Image: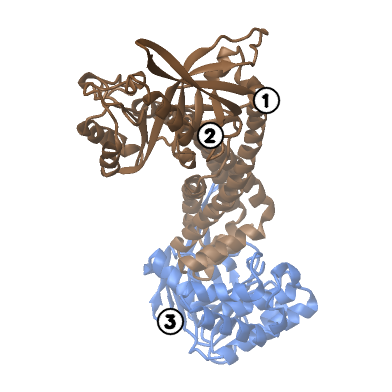
Amino acid sequence: MGRVPGTRIVVEGLSHGYRSAAGDVSVLDGLDLVVEPAAHVALTGASGSGKSTLLCILGGLEVPQQGSVRVGDQDLAGLSRIELAAFRRETVGFVFQHFGLLEALTAAENVELACSLAGVRPAERRRRAAELLEAVDLGDRARHRPIELSGGERQRVAIARALANHPELILADEPTGNLDQASTERVVALLERLPADHGCTLVIVTHDPAIAARARRSLRLVEGRLVERPAAGPGVAAVGATRS
Amino acid sequence: MTWFDAIRLAVRTVRGRPGRAVLTVVAVALAAALLTALLTISTTAETRVLDQLSTGGPLAGIKVAAAAPDPTQIDQDNAKPGRPKALDAAAVRRIQGLPNVRAVVPVVSAPVLVLTSTRTKGGHRLNPFFDQVVGVDLTKIAQLPVTLVAGQLPALDSLSQVAVTEGYLERLGLSRLDAPRVVGTTVVLASPRLVNDGGQTRYQGRWVKMSIVGVVAQDAGDGQFLATTAAVTQARDWSASGDDHGRLLGQDSNGVVSPYAGLFVVARGLDNVAKVRLEITAVGYSTSAPENLIASVRRYLRVVEIVLSAVGLIALLVAALGITNAMLAAVRERRREIGVLKAIGARDRDIYRTFLLEAATLGFIGGALGAFVGWLIALAVAAVVNGYLAQQRLSGIHVSLPLSVIVGVLAGSTLLAFAAGILPAARAARMPAREAVSGV
């Protein structure tokens, strides 16, 4: 598998909120963050603290309302819908708690789908899907549908799909939230290897302190701002994060 | 994402959700079946009606009389002929050589005195009566306005077999249903000729006993008896050999007896009938063809077809609304899936395309299923109709599913479903990518 250089994330003064029936709700409030290429960052926080919102903004699923978000050399605030789709396709790989696999497709087809969206030729997609499924130890389950796979296997297929287009950034939203202990261990181990094996930057949102503790850097979202937790690993720097 | 990939994804998605897909496909299939059945039945009805109008012969048939054209009658379907004019071999060759003429079948006829021992329905003996026996080349029967009602046609080389028309049945007080009763009976046809016997003119008869082998509806010539050309030519030759030099057969203004009573000319298609009639008129003969009647009937049948199609289309429109509804529900249900597709890089247009193709796939499958079921319905209706026609001693109908109906129903249901998918597809395409994380 080819290594990609990873990407640097720079967030400055990010504020973001939602309009609800009860009024405007501020979720992120002047948040600053710098993540160096190939870093492994865990993001924790209470429910509703804005973890998923931050993940959505970093992944181009949502446009920041205020402040700047730079991923690599791209300023996400200035991208159109089409450019954001291209950014997600070419730069980001998502891993969801709910796996996000299309039930109608087989494991291999789910991986190939990401390639087909990027315009990869059929023969190349098949080769890439086989290679990635082999890498996550699911080479023999390529023709199985998600319903025929265990939770852990589904999540590994999702990781393979996230890697399909050689992303520089992997964003994982509670990737072990629906898994048992054994599967959790296997998935986390797989994710943890990504920065080293693929050179991509990894940001994991998690409620699990054990998983957060295994990251080289752990951040906690409190009242819309990031609070740096100890044990920051090498190659990681925070701007404006408050040391707890 | 290419169109091919989008089609594959759409088909796989439809297959992957059989529960929802089946109900939607059934709705489309029912509508498509209705449309197919109505169109097939109306097309068959049109064929049947036009067949009846042409008494089984080709619709593009033109009758040519052994008479000059009457200028006031040229545009009439049943033109009254002008003065008698001999129709000889030279005229036949000339007409055969006209452009847009596919075939020319000569018709001969001869006067006969008819004696029959068959009693009327009331049990009375029928008095002898004069009529005409019509002779045609029976190998070309398919090109003539002749329909077999009962029995069979005379053998190709027979001099003693004859088929009778419904006019003969009427003389006996019989209806078409009674046609088989006269098959197998005999009739004596006496061809007359005038002879001078010592200054006295009297008739001599050539008596031929003929077997009635069938009953036909025919419009090839005027007469209640249909026989082979050879049989009728013998009768004519006898009548022409009298001392009046064939005046019994009728002569034109030049005193010539026409060898043919008329011709049946087949034009190359209905559109050429008027043209060929004008050309034959220019050659100098009176023509008649039911072209105006057929055109009027076709117009009425077209209106019926449009009305029936409209009924089917309304059903398809209702089914299309069902597709829209089902697809809107699918979009609501699949918010997270749409979000995931966007998260892995799908553009709005990829989502739009996939949902449109999903709708089109439902329409195509429903259309194909509906066309098949509609054809079965048309066959069932035809079976019932044929049962009734058989009771009435009428020839049955043959239902065939025209390719144009299959293509039309398939294309119509697919395009309509495609259109029905526009709103749900647009809604899916506009859905925020964030649904990947927050959707349920």
Q: Chain of mark 3?
A: A
Same chain for mark 1 and mark 2? The answer is yes
Question: Callout 1 environment at 10 Å: few (<14), some (14 to 19), or many (20+)?
Answer: few
B85 to the left or right of B218: left
The amino acid at mark 3 is Gly
Q: Which of the two residues, A10 or A72, is positioned nearer the viewer here?
A: A72
Task: Report the residue marked by disc 1.
Answer: B391
Question: Can residue B21 be seen by looking at this rendering?
Answer: yes
Colour brown belongs to chain: B
Same chain for mark 3 and mark 2? The answer is no
Question: Callout 3 environment at 10 Å: few (<14), some (14 to 19), or many (20+)?
Answer: some
The amino acid at mark 1 is Gln
Q: Using the image, tell me which numbered label, if any, was put on residue A72.
A: 3
Which one is closest to the eye, mark 3 or mark 2?
2
Residue B146, image x, y percentages: 49, 32
Q: Which of the two residues, B225 or B70, is positioned nearer the viewer here?
A: B225
Q: Using the image, tell me which numbered label, if any, was put on residue B159.
A: 2
Which one is closest to the eye, mark 1 or mark 2?
2
Q: Secondary structure at mark 3?
A: loop
Against B388, residue A1 (above or below) is below
Residue B358, image x, y percentages: 55, 56
Q: CA distance from mark 1 to mark 2?
A: 33 Å
Q: Chain of mark 1?
A: B
Q: Are marks 3 and 1 in contact (CB under 8 Å)?
A: no
Q: CA distance from mark 3 to mark 1?
A: 86 Å
Q: Secondary structure at mark 1?
A: helix
Q: Which of the two residues, B120 or B422, is positioned nearer the viewer here?
A: B120
